[in-house]
Image (cartoon, rainbow, N blue to C red):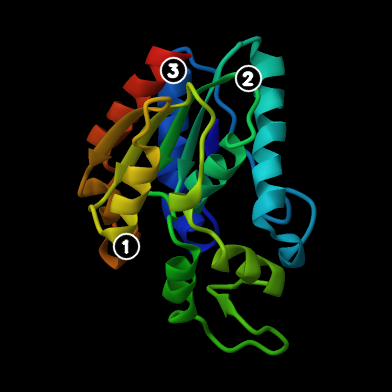
Amino acid sequence: MLCGPFGPEAIRSYRMLRLLADRLASAGCPVLRFDYHGTGDSPGDDEGASLPGWAGDIGVAHRELAARSGKNTVAWIGLRLGASLCALAAQTARTGLGLLVLWDPVISGLSYLEIYRSQSGPRAGVAFETMGFEFSDRFRNDLSTLNLANMSLPPGTRVTAIVGSEDSHAVALKAALTRPEVALDWTVSPAVAEWNSEKALNSAVVPMQLLQGIESKVMERV
């Protein structure tokens, strides 16, 4: 199950996630991609955006994929904010989560907000928007309290975390995940940051080695 990013990052990563979905499907793994409430083809609007609501969407998508595929376990692959949502949803997941892939997760919601606040453009009646994507008051409030370093995953959770560098946020996340009851595979890959750069936005570069690694991890667990 692929859980994509939000806003401009969703646009930048669309082709890459589609390619990953095709690779997994070709390898015999049932795949589900979906839009969170108020995004893409899902009902709702920007005002309905909320982290708890979108984390709930992941639970719904999990049950749908499990029912359609007949699989007892499902791998969640989350990219950027999608990875953060997966982590939030995983804290209350009951059964069937075979692997949690946190791919360049948004660890600090405040730092994420600052990135997009600096890119925000003026728009009548909207306090904060960037590239046509609105950050509602509720959404900004949710992000301001997001800190994955404070999360606690259920015992037995298997996590593959991929970060671009070990900055202070990544170090804090690694410490939170380094517990006896969590099986952690921690990878630092420069390719993580490349897709989100301005250079990558205008190129067709896809980190194939990284996609192959994620595919291998998923196929081991489902």
Contact (Cβ within 8 Å) of mark 3 with mark 2: no
Quadrant (top left/top right/bottom left/bottom right) for the N terminus: top right
Distance (Cα) linking label 2 and label 1: 41 Å
Crowding at dot 1, Cα within 10 Å, few <14 / some 14-19 / many 20+, comes out as: few
**Front residue of this view, candidates 206 and 102:** 102
Q: What residue type is labelled 1?
A: Asn
Secondary structure under tag 3 reads helix
Residue shown at the point (44%, 22%) measured from the top left = 24
Q: What residue type is labelled 2?
A: Thr
Q: Which mark is residue 95?
A: 2
Identify the residue under disc 1: 202
Does residue 69 appear in the picture of this structure? Answer: yes
Q: What residue type is labelled 3?
A: Ser
Q: Is residue 169 above or below residue 184?
A: below
Residue shown at the point (26%, 51%) measured from the top left = 164
Reading the chain from its start, which is encountered first: label 3 or label 2? 3
- In the picture provided, is 85 more to the left or to the right than 115? right
Reading the chain from its start, which is encountered first: label 2 or label 1? 2
Distance (Cα) linking label 3 and label 2: 26 Å
**Front residue of this view, candidates 87 and 44:** 87
Residue shown at the point (34%, 30%) measured from the top left = 184
Secondary structure under tag 1 reads loop
Q: In this view, does 41 lie above or below 96?
A: below
Identify the residue under disc 3: 26
- In the picture provided, is 20 more to the left or to the right than 59? left
Q: Where is residue 48 in the image (x, y as percent from the top left)?
A: 76, 61
Reading the chain from its start, which is encountered first: label 3 or label 1? 3
Q: Position of residue 95 (x, y in %)?
A: 63, 19
Q: Where is residue 35 in the image (x, y as percent from the top left)?
A: 65, 45
- In the picture provided, is 205 more to the left or to the right than 143? left
